[in-house]
Image (cartoon, rainbow, N blue to C red):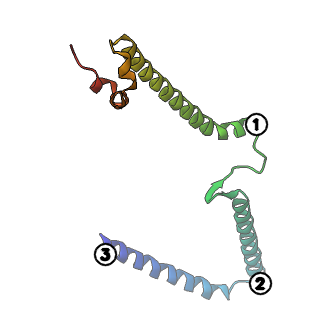
Amino acid sequence: MTTNFTLRNDVETQLAMRWVQGLDASLETLPHHVSERLRVARLKALDLQRVQLKQTASHLSINGGVATISGSDEEPNLWSRLASYLPLLVLLAGLIGIQEFQNDSNAHKMANLDQALLLDDLPPDAYTDPGFLKFLSVPSDAGQTQP
């Protein structure tokens, strides 16, 4: 496969070189007005290419190492600005939601522990015992025993 592609590429290159040589040889036989028209057309094509490159470069902007290409020269309107901030707002809302869920989960765990302590029959001296603090730090599932 690779040799066929390389062979084909070589044949095309040789054919192109022959055409270029033929066109260069016939260029000397062209009348002056035709060669002048070709020169003007070549200059117009180069100018057009330069203008297109400048337009492409003017639409290219680099922000923080990220290159973006904008489609027009006009300033972004209110809706496009809001749309650009939308992912940030969604991220912030998600983080706030996670924080609220964690706070709610912690509050439920503490409420279950308080409920277990209030419903359990403990002498008042147990609350001052240093081992009781260690008992409270154990998760509620492992600290509870079945009667």
Per the model, the C-alpha gap separating discs 1 and 2 is: 58 Å
Measured as percent of width and height from the top left, residue 76 is found at 75, 43
**Residue type at the position of mark 1:** Leu
- Judge left or right: residue 36 versus residue 131: right
Measured as percent of width and height from the top left, residue 59 is found at 71, 56
The quadrant holding residue 36 is: bottom right
Write down the residue under mark 3: 3
Per the model, the C-alpha gap separating discs 3 and 2 is: 45 Å
Near-viewer residue (69 or 32): 69
- Judge left or right: residue 118 versus residue 31: left
- Judge left or right: residue 133 versus residue 78: left
Residue at x 75%, y 74% (from the top left corner): 43
Precedes in sequence: disc 1 or disc 3: 3
Q: In terms of secondary structure, where does tag 1 sit?
A: helix
Report the mark closest to the observer, 1 or 3. 1
Residue at x 39%, y 22% (from the top left corner): 127
**Residue type at the position of mark 2:** His
| Residue 78: mark in rendering | 1
Near-viewer residue (135 or 113): 135
Precedes in sequence: disc 1 or disc 2: 2
Q: Residues within 10 Å of mark 3 (few under 14, many from 20)?
A: few
**Residue type at the position of mark 3:** Thr
Near-viewer residue (52 or 74): 74
Write down the residue under mark 2: 32
Q: Residues within 10 Å of mark 2 (few under 14, many from 20)?
A: few
Q: Quadrant of the N terminus?
A: bottom left
Q: Residue furthest left?
A: 147
Residue at x 77%, y 84% (from the top left corner): 32
